């Protein structure tokens, strides 16, 4: 199933900031994002997770295949 990019909400909060990721729980200086997953059920709005580290955001959006390639290209950093 292919999900439109407009249905996902990814926003870069800070390029380098000390914070704890809501998904994996790492605490370090890293890029922080807000992330809301795609809405597949019409009457349920998924929660917005903030702050989330770069690795977790790319893993949630692209899966595990080609994850490092997409991170090097920084494809999500331009979407606001």
Image (cartoon, rainbow, N blue to C red):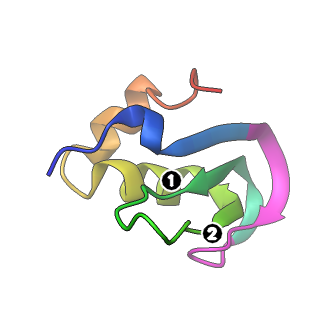
Q: Is residue 72 left or right of residue 22?
A: left
Residue 68 x, y percent position in the rendering:
32, 43
Residue at (68% x, 48% y) in the render? 33
Residue at (40% x, 59% y) in the render? 60
Front residue of 35 and 51: 35
Residue 39 x, y percent position in the rendering:
43, 59
Residue 54 x, y percent position in the rendering:
56, 49
Front residue of 7 and 43: 43
Question: Which residue is denoted by mark 1 in the rendering?
Answer: 57
Front residue of 79 and 23: 79
Question: Which residue is denoted by mark 2 in the rendering?
Answer: 47
Residue at (43% x, 26% y) in the render? 75
The image shows a total of numbered marks equal to 2
The stretch in magenta equals 13-26
Residue at (28% x, 44% y) in the render? 3
Membership of 23 in magenta stretch: yes
Residue 25 vertical placement versus 55 (above, below): below
Residue 68 vertical placement versus 28 (above, below): above
Residue 24 vertical placement versus 14 (above, below): below
Q: Please tell me the numbered disc located at residue 73.
A: none
């Amino acid at each position: 199933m292919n999900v439109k990019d407009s249905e996902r909400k990814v926003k870069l909060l800070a390029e380098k900031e000390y914070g704890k990721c809501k998904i994996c729980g790492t605490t370090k200086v890293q890029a922080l994002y807000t992330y809301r997953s795609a809405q597949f059920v019409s009457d349920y709005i998924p929660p917005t997770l903030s702050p989330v580290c770069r690795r977790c955001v790319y893993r949630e959006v692209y899966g595990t295949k080609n994850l490092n390639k997409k991170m090097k290209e920084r494809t999500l950093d331009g979407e606001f």
